[in-house]
Each structure stands twice: as C-alpha cells, then as structure tokens.
Image (cartoon, rainbow, N blue to C red):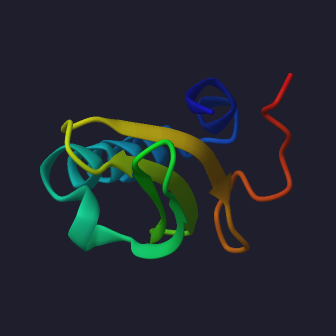
Amino acid sequence: MVERATQLGARDEIVRALTEITAFLVQSPRSWGDPIRNFRHARTVQYRGQHKDFRCTYSVHDRIPIVFMTELTPLEGNPLYGEKFDG
C-alpha cells in the first residue's frame, strides 16, 4: 500500500493513517472498533473499525492480548480506493 501511495503522491497521508490504525489496534482494540462476530470456539471477537477512509476488520482474543488483522480496505475518498492488494 505504501509503495502505491508513494506512486500516487499520497505517501505521507497513507503512512500517517496506517500508523494511527496500528496504534488503535495496539492500545485499545476492544474500544476502537465495533464488535461484529463472536468466534466462541476460537475465543475471539471480530471487530470492524474505520479511520481516515480505511476499514479494518480484526479479531481480539478474549484472554490473551493478541490482535489478528484480517482485512484493511481503502474506502471511497482514499487515494488507494479501487486498488487491489491481495496479490
């Protein structure tokens, strides 16, 4: 994402947004996003958070302080909107 943002001239904006999202996931993952699914057997709760035209889907373990990010999607209005990053 950063490489493509650099090509589009939006590197600083994208790096700042990704840094802030990472901070949310490290410091307050349970209060940042909205819970959307409970994976009872995995003992995790899936959340969806939105920040600066990115949507982030992630799960947080009930007991162990670990976060699993499963999706980071640029939304409309983001310079990276419509780009494919899955390979």
Q: Residue at x 49, y 51 (%)?
A: 58
The image quadrant that residue 64 belongs to is top left
Q: Is residue 54 left or right of residue 17?
A: right
User: Is residue 48 among what the camera can see?
Assistant: yes
Tally the marks.
0
The foreground one among 23 and 79 is 23
Q: Position of residue 23 (x, y in %)?
A: 21, 47
Q: Residue furthest left?
A: 27
Q: Residue at x 86, y 56 (%)?
A: 82
Q: Quadrant of the N terminus?
A: top right
The foreground one among 44 and 51 is 44
Q: Quadrant of the C terminus?
A: top right
The foreground one among 15 and 27 is 27
Q: Residue at x 42, y 50 (%)?
A: 44
The image quadrant that residue 65 belongs to is top left
User: Is residue 13 among what the camera can see?
Assistant: no
Q: Is residue 10 left or right of residue 20?
A: right
Relative to 69, is 81 above or below? below
Q: Position of residue 41 (x, y in %)?
A: 51, 46
The foreground one among 58 and 19 is 58
Q: Is residue 75 left or right of residue 6?
A: right
Q: Position of residue 20 (x, y in %)?
A: 28, 52
Q: Position of residue 35 (x, y in %)?
A: 44, 74
